[in-house]
Image (cartoon, helix red, strand yellow):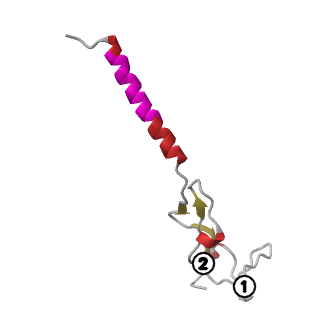
Amino acid sequence: MGLSIDRFLAIVFFIAGVTISYFFYKKSIFKREIVFWQSRTPIQILDLNKIPKSDNETEVGLRIIKTNNQPIKGNLYVSRFCIANEGRKPIKKNDILDKINIGVNGK
C-alpha cells in the first residue's frame, strides 16, 4: 500500500504552508536590537621608534597632541568599533537608559 498522490500533495502543501507562515511571522516581529562590534586587534598607526626623536615631530613636521595640548609620547593605536540597531524597530532617545561614554584612559 503506497502513498496516494492526494495525500502526498496534502503533506507537501501542509509543510509549505507552515514554513511560509513561520517566515512571515518572524518577518512581522518588530524589536530593538542594539549590537556592539569591535575589531579584535588594534592597528598601530604611529611607531615612535621609526621617526626621529625631535619632540615627536617627523620630517614633515607632524606633531600629534592630546586635547590638553600635551604631545603624545607613546605609540598610537586605533581600534574600530560600531554601535548599530539590527532590529526593525527604531531606537528613540527615551529607550536609552544609560549614556554611552567613549574616551581614552577613562576620560
Residue at the extreme right of the image, as rendered: 60
What amino acid type should be assigned to the residue bearing mark 2? Lys
Judged left or right of residue 72, residue 13 is left
- Determine if the magenta segment contains residue 39: no
Q: Quadrant of residue 97?
A: bottom right
The local crowd at label 2, few if under 14, some if 14 to 19, many if 20 or more residues have their Cα within 10 Å, is few
Foreground: 60 or 23? Answer: 23
Could you tell me residue 88's position as x and y percent? 59, 53
Secondary element type, mark 2: loop
Residue at the extreme left of the image, as rendered: 1
Q: Quadrant of residue 99?
A: bottom right
Which residue is under mark 1?
A: 67
Could you tell me residue 17's position as x and y percent? 43, 30
The local crowd at label 1, few if under 14, some if 14 to 19, many if 20 or more residues have their Cα within 10 Å, is few
Judged left or right of residue 17, residue 6 is left
What's the distance in space between the residues labelled 1 and 2, CA to CA?
22 Å
Identify the magenta region: 7-20
Foreground: 40 or 33? Answer: 33
Which residue is under mark 2?
A: 99
Q: Does label 1 or label 2 sit earlier along the sequence?
A: 1
Residue in the image at 42% along x and 28% along y: 16
What amino acid type should be assigned to the residue bearing mark 1? Thr
For the image, the number of numbered tags is 2
Residue 22 vertical placement versus 79 (above, below): above
Residue in the image at 59% along x and 70% along y: 95
Secondary element type, mark 1: loop
Foreground: 86 or 22? Answer: 22
